[in-house]
Amino acid sequence: MRKINLLKPKPVYFFISGATVSVFLFALIFGFQNNNQIGDAGKQMSLQFSITQPEIPREVYLFGEKMPIDNFEVYERLDREIIVNTYLHSATILALKRANRWFPVIEPVLKRNNIPDDFKYLAVAESNLENVVSPAGATGFWQFIKSAATEYGLEVNNEVDERYDVEKSTEAACKFLKDAYQKFGSWTMAAAAYNAGMNGIDKWSGLQKAKNYYNLVLGIETSRYIARVAAIKIIMENPQKYGFNLTEKDLYYPLKYKEVVLDSSVTDFADYAVSLGINYKTLKYFNPWLRDTSLENKNRKKYTIRIPEEGSIKLIEED
């Protein structure tokens, strides 16, 4: 066996000066105090931004129909959507602010057509009360695709797209919902059909031999849809309970406007706007359904143009 020589390690000596000790003690004390400050701040942050389980009501009615939340799966669907929309802060805050402007436009149309008032929350679910365009081309507050829009009486072309007119598109949505209710005998099923189409709901209802929405196996989006509308309603009807403490001054005020009739062609809407005492941007904001800078209007169709009441908004002057 080969002999192994083990070398004895040499001692290592450290020399610490008084200055080094002072620096070490200062860092130790400062760090301790700083940790305490961070701890206090963390406690304050925890108190101010407490993340808790939002309250789930014991009973929920949507479109005048009772949700069967005593069924565990329906309860968990609703629970999910209330959690999502409670903590989807920016979108929910914007919905609350916009609702103050747009619900007064939507509500009378629903009432006039005998559609349950809760359907205004369906518009929130569809677009968050904004004239958005989906990847599939669904457009406006009520997210109509072109074929459905024209079927329900909206004009859609390169110059005019009434899907962007909140009042007219709400009228079209009411027509669809009436047809769906007549077909399915339930506002909940009518709302589901708004998301998945009447043919889709009819097909799955027939295959599964079920007429109750809550007994149907549907795609993820349509399965979540009704619970999402219900969650939006619950939160928007009592926002403070869910942590949204907006004051009246935070809300967007309703637009005040007067109407003028346009029954001729327009070669330049910028010039037309100036003739009305406003600018092109303001004309477009109050009439987003005007999609071009001109209007041919060969048949001299009558269009209603909205312009702000005098003094209701502050126009920005040109330099």
Image (spheres, rainbow, N blue to C red):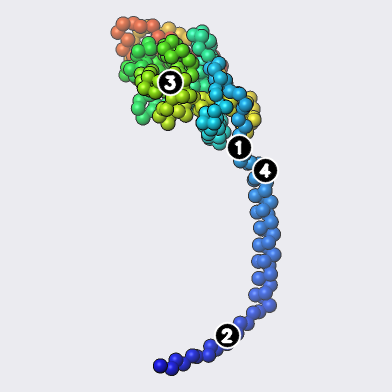
Residue at the spot x=42%, y=27% of the render? 217
- Percent position of residue 290, x then y: 39, 17
Q: Which residue is mark 1?
A: 53
Say which label, 2 or 3, has the lower sequence index.
2
Q: Amino acid at mark 4?
A: Leu
Q: Which residue is mark 3?
A: 210
Residue at the spot x=36%, y=20% of the render? 203
The picture quadrant where one finds residue 233 is top right
Residue 202 visible from this viewpoint: yes
Q: Which residue is mark 2?
A: 12
Residue at the spot x=65%, y=75% of the render? 20
Mark 3 surroundings within 10 Å by alpha-carbon count, few (fewer than 14), some (14 through 19), many (20 or more): some
Q: Amino acid at mark 1?
A: Gln
What is the distance, in whole Å, between disc 1 and disc 4 at their CAs?
Answer: 15 Å
What is the distance, in whole Å, between disc 1 and disc 2 at their CAs?
Answer: 59 Å
- Percent position of residue 99, x then y: 55, 22
* Observer-nearest of 109 and 165: 109
Q: Which residue is mark 4?
A: 47
- Percent position of residue 128, x then y: 49, 26
